[in-house]
Amino acid sequence: MSMMFLSTTAKEILPNVSAVLSAVTPNMVKSDSTIATACRVMNTLMLAEPDTGKKSINTKLVDSLSMLSSNVLFDTARKSAGVLLWSMWGQKDIQYVLKKQGMNKDTFINAITASAYEEATRMNGH
C-alpha cells in the first residue's frame, strides 16, 4: 500500500470508525468481532496517519474504549480496545492531544490494557 493511499484512506475512514467506536454500548455484544475489527482498523490507520488520528480522538471515544476494554462479555473486542488504548498513549503526538484534553495515563496504561497488548504481541510473534 502506498503512503498516499493510506493517507487518503485514513482521512476517509478514521472519523467514521471513531464515531462507531464512540457509540458502542454493552448491549452490542453480538457485534463483538465487528467492533474488534473497527478497533484494529483504527489502530492501524492511527499509526500510519497520526495527524488524522489526532482529530478523531475525543473523550467520548476514549470512555467507550475504556468501557469496552473492561467488559468481559466482549471476548474479542475487549482485547482489541485494550490494545488500541495502549497504542494511543504510546504515540507521543497522540499522547499530547490526550493530555491536552485532560486525560491521564491510567486510562490507557493499566493492567487490562497491558495484558491485552502483551497477548496481542505474543500472538503476532513479536
Image (cartoon, rainbow, N blue to C red):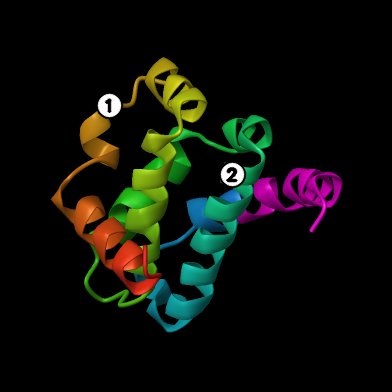
Expressed as whole percent of the image width and height from the top left, the position of residue 100 reads: 43, 16
Query: Which of 44 and 34 lies nearest the eye of the viewer?
Result: 44
Q: Is residue 74 above or below residue 43?
A: below
Amino acid found under the numbered disc labelled 1: Asn
Tag 2: Cα neighbours inside 10 Å, few (<14), some, or many (≥20)?
many
Which SS type dominates the magenta stretch? helix
SS class, disc 2: helix
Expressed as whole percent of the image width and height from the top left, the position of residue 113 reads: 25, 52
Which label is found at residue 46? 2
Which label is found at residue 104? 1
Q: Is residue 12 magenta?
A: yes
Q: Residue placed at 63% from the left, 50% from the top?
A: 45
Would you say 11 lies left or right of 123 here? right
Magenta span covers which residues?
1-17
Count of labels shown?
2
Q: Residue placed at 46% from the left, 69% from the top?
A: 36
Expressed as whole percent of the image width and height from the top left, the position of residue 54 reads: 58, 31
